[in-house]
Structures are given as structure tokens and as C-alpha cells.
């Protein structure tokens, strides 16, 4: 299945954390935002393509059913999450993919996600949305020189010299990046457009040398220097 971009909207931190854990387990899901406030999520959706929304119903600022009605004309699909079973009928009337009753098990979560129509995944975006802590960054892919793994985090190294830290894994990230990006090492992804040379087993990007693993060497050489 193609990568599905998703966001989580729930006013309860524990509920958001649980869903974030579940999303992380599913290789074809790419979380690009988690929101306590649905109003902030509306602003985000206006600027960023989102394939799938995990949406709580009972929220103080704006009910999930009201939120779904507002975005009804968008291409985003909705999976409702709530502790109240009486909202199920209303959820399906709004053409929700599914309705998850809390507490949500992983198997039930996965069953709901698998209902997503794969042909409706967003086309490659002209920008990347990076979540770093409570901050969101919107950058053009060609601003990124390389991405480096650091334990449970990755560092985006930009042309400006700035570094953005995000809680992601390289193995999942590479599936969501434009085709100009290549995995060259267990700890590195490079933007092929920024590579200027290959010295021994190191790629040259500006004044930085990026090691190339033996398992990636032939593919990297063929992709970048043929």
C-alpha cells in the first residue's frame, strides 16, 4: 500500500499518545501532525494535504462531527474515535471510514485503517512538513542536503546550515520522500541533487563526507554517477 499521510485530533493527551504509538507500528502510515485543538487542525489542513484523520468526537472547542462537516468537501478521510457509542450512527452518516470505540485495541485500529481506499493517497507534495516537538516546519525538499539518524530521532540538515530534529525513523521516512532522496547508510539519507562527488566510500555534499555502506554502494553509484 502507498504511504498514507495522517493526523490525530483529540483533546486528551493519553488518547493522542496511544494513537501515535499505533500509527508508528504501521509502516504505510505517516503521521504529519497531532492536535489537541481542532481549530489548529483546521488551519493545518488548509495548508497541507492530509489523507486520513483520526478524529475524536467529544471536544470542547469543536465537536468531531462538526469538524467532519466543515471538511466534507475535502479529500481527507475520517476515522472517528470516541468513548460514546451513541455517536456511531452520526459518524457513519458523515461517510466516516470507521468508528473506533475507546479503549481502542491495535487490531481494531488496524482493521479501520485497512478500509482506506489506496487509490486516494495524495500525490507527492511540493513541500515537506516536519514535526519537531510542538513545532511544524514546511520546507521545499531541495532545501534538505541530507538526513542523519540519531537514536530515536533524525536530523534534517538544510542548505542554510540549520538542523531540524524530528522523532522519525529513516526506514519509514525514505518511503515518503521524493525520488531524489536515497538511503546510503543505516544512518544516512541524502538528497541526490546535492551530491557533488564520491571519494572512496564517501559521498561529498559541500564540505561534508557521508559514508556509503557496502550494501548500498552499487545502487548509489549507479543512481548518482551513471
Image (cartoon, helix red, strand yellow):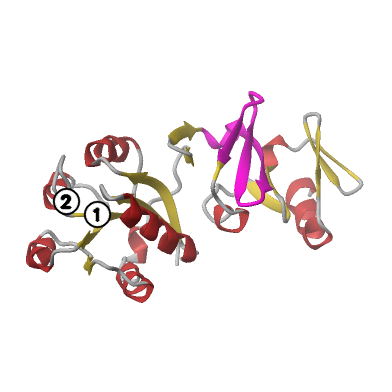
First-in-chain label (1 vs 2) = 1
Residue 81 or 73: which is nearer the viewer? 81
> Residue 112 in the image: x percent, y percent?
30, 70
> Residue 204 in the image: x percent, y percent?
81, 37
* Mark 2: secondary structure: helix
Residue 111 visible in this rendered orientation of the protein: yes
**Is mark 1 in CB contact (under 8 Å) with mark 2?**
yes
The residue under the point 76% across, 58% down is 219
- In the rendered structure, the answer to whether residue 179 lies left or right of residue 218 reads left
Mark drawn on residue 55: 1
Mark 2 sits on what residue? 64
> Residue 42 in the image: x percent, y percent?
24, 39
> Residue 88 in the image: x percent, y percent?
12, 67
| Residue 166 sits in quarter | top right
The Cα atoms of the two marked residues, 1 and 2, are separated by 6 Å
Q: Is residue 151 magenta?
A: yes
| Label 1 CA crowd tier, 10 Å (few <14, some 14–19, many 20+) | many
What segment carries the magenta color? 140-165
Q: Quadrant of the N terminus?
A: bottom left
Q: Is residue 104 magenta?
A: no
- In the rendered structure, the answer to whether residue 88 lies left or right of residue 221 reads left
- In the rendered structure, the answer to whether residue 223 lies left or right of residue 130 reads right
- In the rendered structure, the answer to whether residue 62 lies left or right of residue 149 reads left
Residue 52 visible in this rendered orientation of the protein: no
Amino acid at each position: 500500500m502507498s504511504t498514507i499521510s495522517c493526523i490525530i485530533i483529540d483533546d486528551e493527551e493519553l488518547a493522542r499518545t496511544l494513537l501515535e504509538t499505533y500509527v508508528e507500528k504501521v509502516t504505510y502510515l505517516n503521521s504529519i501532525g497531532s492536535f489537541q485543538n481542532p481549530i489548529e487542525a483546521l488551519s493545518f489542513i488548509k495548508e497541507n494535504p492530509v489523507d486520513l484523520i483520526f478524529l475524536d468526537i467529544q471536544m470542547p472547542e469543536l465537536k468531531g462531527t462538526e469538524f467532519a462537516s466543515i471538511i466534507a468537501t475535502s479529500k481527507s478521510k475520517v476515522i472517528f474515535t470516541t468513548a460514546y457509542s451513541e455517536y456511531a450512527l452520526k459518524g457513519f452518516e458523515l461517510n466516516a471510514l470507521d468508528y473506533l470505540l475507546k479503549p481502542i485495541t491495535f487490531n481494531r485500529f488496524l482493521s479501520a485503517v485497512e478500509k482506506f481506499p489506496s487509490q486516494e493517497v495524495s500525490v507527492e507534495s511540493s513541500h515537506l512538513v516536519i514535526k519537531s516537538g510542538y513545532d511544524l516546519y514546511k520546507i521545499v525538499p531541495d532545501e534538505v542536503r541530507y538526513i542523519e539518524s540519531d537514536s530515536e530521532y533524525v536530523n534534517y540538515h538544510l542548505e542554510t546550515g540549520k538542523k531540524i530534529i524530528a522523532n522519525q525513523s529513516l526506514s519509514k521516512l525514505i518511503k515518503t520522500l521524493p525520488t531524489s532522496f536515497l538511503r546510503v547508510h543505516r544512518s544516512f539519507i541524502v538528497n541526490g541533487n546535492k551530491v557533488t562527488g564520491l571519494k572512496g566510500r564517501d559521498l561529498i555534499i559541500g564540505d561534508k563526507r557521508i559514508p556509503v555502506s557496502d550494501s548500498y554502494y552499487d545502487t548509489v553509484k549507479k543512481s548518482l554517477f551513471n
